[in-house]
Image: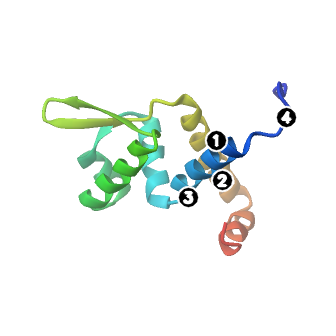
Amino acid sequence: MGEIVDCADPSDGVLTEAAAVFGLLASPARLHIVWALSQGESDVTRLADRVGGALPAVSQHLAKLKLAGLVCSRREGRRQIYYVDDPDIVTVVRVTVGQLTARSHQFPAPVRRLREAGV
């Protein structure tokens, strides 16, 4: 296990900001978009195809994620290319989704219990 450097409780501001980030990622569509972008950059058309969302809906999700600073973009010709520029967000998403995927294959009940609990 990694060493815990600081055991002090985070400030209310940090907790509020963290809750906002988790709130944005609580949407399955936005989480899927961040998951896809954690695998590599993409334009909105390819993202919509990958996540199975309508182009306008994916664009709106990207706008929210970009406004929150979770997603960045750059222009490439006439296209906007989206990417996640925060390695910590990539790690959180990959670890969480990876762990839940592994658990769902080994022990399907706990994941179902999370859904049933409204988590």
At mark 1, the secondary structure is helix
- Label 4: which residue? 8
Q: Is residue 107 left or right of residue 67?
A: right
| Alpha carbons under labels 4 and 2: distance apart | 29 Å
Name the element at disc 4. loop
Classify residue 61 by image quadrant: bottom left
Mark sitting earlier along the chain (3/2): 3
User: Residue 48 in the image: x percent, y percent?
Assistant: 30, 53
State the separation of the CA atoms marked 4 and 3: 26 Å
Identify the amino acid type marked 3.
Ala
Q: Which residue is mark 3?
A: 26
| Distance of label 3 from label 2 (alpha carbons) | 14 Å
Rendered location of residue 94, percent (x, y)? 58, 41
Q: Which residue is mark 1?
A: 95
Q: Residue at x 64, y 41 (%)?
A: 95
Give SS at disc 3. Answer: loop
Label 2 secondary element:
helix
Quarter placement of the C terminus: bottom right
Q: Depth-wise, is mark 4 or mark 1 nearer the camera?
A: 4
Q: For the residue carrying disc 4, how many other residues have a C-alpha within 10 Å: few (<14), some (14-19), or many (20+)?
A: few
Q: Residue at x 44, y 58 (%)?
A: 29
The mark nearer the N terminus, 1 or 3, is: 3
Work out how far the residue at label 1 is from the one at label 2, CA to CA, in angstroms: 8 Å
Q: Which mark is residue 100?
A: 2
Q: Residue at x 66, y 71 (%)?
A: 118
Name the N-terminal-most of marks 1 and 2. Answer: 1
Question: Of circles 3 and 2, which is in front?
Answer: 3
What is the total number of numbered labels drawn onto the structure image?
4
In the figure, residue 103 lies in which quadrant? bottom right
